[in-house]
Each structure stands twice: as C-alpha cells, then as structure tokens.
Amino acid sequence: MSPRASRASAPPAANGLVAAPKSRQRQQVTPRPATDPKELVGYYRLMLLIRRFEEKTAEMYQRAKIGGYCHLNLGEEATCVGLAAGMRPTDYLFTNYREHGYAIARGIEPELVMAELFGREGGVAHGRGGSMHLFSAEKRLMGGYAIVGGQIPLATGAGLAIRRKGENDVVVCQMGDATTNIGAFHESLNLAALWKLPVVYVIINNGFGMGTSVEAGSSVAALHEKACAYGIPGVEVDGNDVIIVRDAIREAVERARSERIPTLMNIKSYRLRGHSVVDPDRYRSEQYLQRIRGLDPVARLADQLKRDGILDDEALEQLETEVEREVDAAVEFADDSPEPDPKKLFEFSYATEVPNQPSALPGQDPWR
Ligand SMILES: Cc1ncc(C[n+]2csc(CCOP(=O)(O)OP(=O)(O)O)c2C)c(N)n1
C-alpha cells in the first residue's frame, strides 16, 4: 500500500452541511531512491533486536524482574525503526507508554532500557520512570506518557517553543489509534494547524485500544481523515514495511520543517499480543491472529533480504545469534545495576532546583 495523503477541503453538500470527503486525492510519496543494502540490513538488525528485546521483556515480567504496567511493540517493529529513520537525530520524539522499541530505534542502548524496566539506577531514567516513562534528553526522546493523550499537548507546546525560538527542529508525536478520540488530540491539532507548528502527529494504528476495535470506538474509522477537520494533510501508511514508513515520515517531517505544515499520519500496524503483558487477549479470534501473524514485518523483511540476495540463511542465523547475545547482555546489565536509593526518589523530578521541590516520601508529612 502506498501512503495516501489527503488535504481535505470538502465541498458543501446540498443541505448546506460540509460533506465528509469521499474520494481522496491519491498522492504518491516522492519516489524513493533504492535503499542501500547495508542500510536495509541495519534496519532488519534493529527490528530483530526490538523483537527479541520485547520477547525477553515478557519473560522478565513473568519472572517478576519487572513490575507495574508493561506494553510491548511486538508486531510494530517496522513502525519503530521506520519512524526513527525518517527523523533527524536532533528532532524531538514524544510517545505513549508503548515505547521500548522507539527508544531502542532512537539509539538508546538496550541495556539502559532493560535496566529502566527493572527499575534500576543504571536505567535510562535512573529507574524513576519504568516501562512507560523512558526518557533521554540526549537522544531527544521526551518520554513515554502513561496518560492516554498526555503527550499530545506537550508535543504541541514543544512545537510552539521551536517556532517562537526560530529553531529548525521538528517534533514527532506518536500515539495509539484510540487516542484520537481524546479531547486533547483535537485541541492540539487545531492549534498546530492554526499556528503552523512543526509537529507530525503519528497514529500507530494497531486496530485496538485495549479490547475495543477502532470501528467500535471511533465514528471515523479511517483515522487520517480526522485531519480534514483542521485542513492539514492526512496520510495512510502501511506500517509493516519499514521503508514505506521511513519515507512517509521523512516527507511529513520535512514538510513540517520547511513549510510548517503539521501532518496526521495513520500508520497501520498490528500488535501480535495483548494490550499489555497481562492481557490474555480473548477479544481477538484465532482467525484474526493467524492473519496478522502472516503479515509479520520482521519475517517479511528477512524474506525480502533473502529474495534480493542480500543475506542468506547463514547470515540471518549469524544476526540472530548476535542479537540474542545483545539482549542477554542487557538483562545481565540490568540485573547487576543497583536499586535507586529511596532517599533520592525525587532526584531528576525537576530540571532545575525549585523552592517548593517536594522531598517527602509517600506517607511522610510534605510540610515538615
Ligand atoms: C486518560 C486515560 N484514560 C484511560 C487510560 C487507560 N488506558 C490505558 S491504555 C488505553 C488504550 C489506548 O489505546 P491506543 O491509544 O490505541 O494505544 P495502544 O495501546 O494501542 O498503543 C487505555 C484506555 C489511560 N491510561 N489514560
């Protein structure tokens, strides 16, 4: 599926109401240059790393090494890698709580991510964030947000800050499909369009918000069409192909940078397991699961690499061994990393010292 873009300006219907756009203009993303085989192998390795990392995370959760909520990117690897590859390293990324893969694709060491999941001092957020709050100012990953839609106004504000400072960076704001039903989504898109903010809103549409399908939760199931309410481009993208995702993101990011036009992207993907690691996933039929397993983006890229004569079975096996070693090393690092000192619980809560910075632990008198 090629990315489809619509800049909707619907004609008034006979009753005077504005009709929803029926046929959308088909806009091919700028023809892409052939991807360098080395680059393709790099993307595959990263996708495989995310796949094995997330499988190991599920195992570590079952072993009680990880606590709290935990959501995996299994099945969404092409969106993680393609999204990161379409941005400049200096652009900002805001995500929801399903973000381990984005953090790794952004260049954060898997060991720092695993240590964060274990709640250890050596984690990327010093163990203060956990699975849903990965953060790295250095890599411009601005979090990991657990409140559905919480990242959207913040990402929009970051776009406003960039604009006011006259800087050249772009903000990418990732979210799930169900998040497009939240009020902050609409308020943010309205302001971003009105103020011409350099923000790209990226829906990773895995078809479900917990156990509710897109069709059951949204009056408009083609989610990119929600862009027409704000007069900005809405683009539908095949999220199982890393190159298609990369090129679609790149085009939207560069449009935001050079023309200050925000875009709403609807990247269609699938999650191979339940909503979180504790979800038994009873609301999806075996038939549905079989169909989406057949679309697996990691297997699809491995097949392509073999078909194009870029990697043979032996080379694929070699990559598998390397990646498994890397994931085992991440677990070892996390296991060896110390627990944070409870007395330092509030460290890293604020960027600068503020007079009313809380220092009391839960249960203690905050005014003492
Ligand atoms: C404001 C708010 N309401 C409800 C929840 C509970 N909740 C957590 S995840 C989720 C579903 C979100 O689905 P979606 O946006 O499609 O993202 P996905 O999990 O598929 O990545 C809900 C309702 C929450 N965390 N925050």
Image: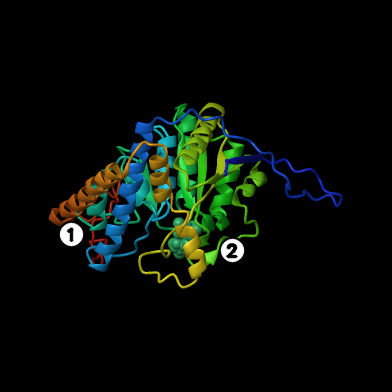
Q: How many marks?
A: 2
Mark 1: secondary structure: helix
Residue type at tag 2: Gly
Q: Quadrant of the N terminus?
A: top right
Tell me the residue that label 1 is attached to: 342
Q: Residue at x 42, y 42 (%)?
A: 304
Q: Position of residue 336 (x, y in %)?
A: 13, 54
Residue type at tag 1: Pro
Quadrant for residue 235, please give it.
top right
Q: Residue at x 30, y 62 (%)?
A: 58
Q: Residue at x 48, y 69 (%)?
A: 286
Tell me the residue that label 2 is attached to: 217
Tag nearer the camera, 1 or 2? 2
Q: Position of residue 18 (x, y in %)?
A: 77, 48
Answer yes or no: do the residues labelled 1 and 2 have beta carbons within 8 Å? no
Q: Position of residue 37 (x, y in %)?
A: 38, 32
Mark 2: secondary structure: helix
Q: Nearer the viewer, residue 331 or 15?
A: 331
Q: Nearer the viewer, residue 268 or 366?
A: 268
The crowd level at tag 1 (other Cα within 10 Å; few <14, some 14-19, many 20+) is few
Residue sitting at the far right:
14
Upstream in sequence: badge 1 or badge 2: 2
Q: Which mark is residue 143?
A: none
Would you say the beta carbon of the disc 2 residue lies within 8 angstroms of ligand 1? no
